[in-house]
Image (cartoon, rainbow, N blue to C red):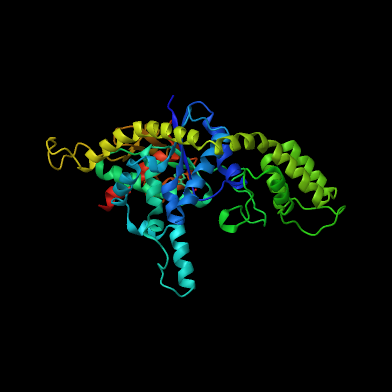
Amino acid sequence: MSIERFLTGITTSGTPHLGNYVGSIRPSVRHSQRSQVQSFYFLADYHALIKIDEPVRIQRSTLEIAASWLACGLDPERVVFYRQSDIPEIPELTWFLTCVLGKGVLNRAHAYKAAVDKNTAAGTDADADVSAGLFMYPVLMGADILMFNAHQVPVGRDQVQHIEMARDMAHSFNHRYGVHFVAPEAAIEDNVATLPGLDGRKMSKSYDNTIPLFAPREQLQKLIASIVTDSRAPGEPKDTEGSALFQIYQAFASAEETATLKQAFADGIAWGEAKQLVFERIDQEIAPMRTAYLALINDPGKIEAILRAGAAKARAIATPFMAELRHAVGLRDLRSKEAAGNKTTKVALPVFKQYREADGQFYFKLQDGDGRLLLQSRGFAAPKVAGQTIATLQTQGASALAGMTDQLELATGVSASDLENALLTLREAKAK
Ligand code: TRP
């Protein structure tokens, strides 16, 4: 059975909060404990430079985030846990990817576009205060992912576009230089993807509405007491719908506990009492980890050693891979002999094959360049319909599959992203 590679990074630009814990750290740590997965966890400190120019804050945040993940149970023996800036291959790969990605793709990146829109609204120059680093952010992120050929990248919805860009870079590179990269997929945690903050909006350091993950017990209690509620008096039934307090509780409690609180809301529990309940439930989960966290944060040497050992593991993969990539693009030992314009690394293109079966019906299938079956159609009475179905797939990509489940079937072991890759490769080849 093949091993799935799973990768995630956290920008070292702040102190981890409950939203990071619920949305990223907790699911990631759980996931890393499964068999058949190889996990990569890293501290995205190069990314932090985009937002922060206070060296001490970056250093402190790196320490806090590393300590948080370890305290939450990440096992550095089992996973590859490293600091991005310890891997010089990552910025090198960033440059390779920069050269295969269309600039227009970056123009359309949400974070950049938001900055431009804000400037435009304010009547200033479109690119005012936009660093080239912000503009290039998705490429660096693509390099993080492609460096280790990760299959799955757990991200919030706001980051899905970045994964799509990473896929785009993988395809463009593969298309030019032969297949070296896997196209990654975004893995979205749907049940508790985002946690509301103190003011009810998404918990985020940009809204200044966060609850630090390892706030001391008393501070945690105070912060939870400050979560916004409506003004219903004790005894009045309360809505769970739209209640930040309830949603936060739900992220920590079992289904049973949640149902009990829901009932208490209906029965008119006082807000103060509900807050106390939520506080105790959260603290119950966090308290043991808080102790571990404090011990770690007071021993930076230990964390430094763990990260360096992790970097050695990561580079055992990245260094030879980068050598392969350098060779692929032509940054080579001058003595090495490979004929100019050598086409052996070119990928054979996927093909659609149409045919008629003994049953008189018309069929088609899609094979990749090596003849592996990717997609099989059912029988169509008319060849024209088969042809139209192919055309729809070619223009709409794998998203068209959803509406065609009774006409088409992915071959076993083929994922929607494999199909998407094949269709993209075809489209790119046509565009040439
Ligand atoms: N952009 C992510 C964030 O802001 C951090 C990040 C950097 C990342 N590189 C990544 C996440 C690669 C997943 C994969 O949190």
The picture places residue 320, in percent across and down from the top left corner, at: 29, 33
The percent position of residue 217, horizontal first and vertical second, equals 70, 43
The single residue placed furthest to the right in the displayed view is 235
- Asked whether 265 or 277 is in front, the reply is 277
Q: Residue at x 82, y 58 (%)?
A: 232
Front residue of 323 and 212 = 212
Residue nearer the viewer, 341 or 365: 341
Task: Give percent across and percent down for residue 87.
Answer: 36, 40
- Residue 37 % position (x, y): 47, 30
Q: Quadrant of the N terminus?
A: top left
Which residue is at the far top? 1
Q: Residue at x 35, y 59 (%)?
A: 104
- Residue appearing at x 16%, y 37% in the figure: 333
Please determine whether, in this image, residue 311 is positioned above or below residue 168: above
Q: Is residue 205 visible in this depiction of the protein?
A: yes
Horizontal relation, residue 405 to residue 357: left or right: right
- Above or below, comparing residue 411 to residue 200 in the picture: above
| Any part of residue 390 in sight | no
> Residue 297 versus residue 231: which sits nearer the camera?
297
Identified at 85% across, 48% down, the residue is 267
Total number of numbered discs in the rendering = 0
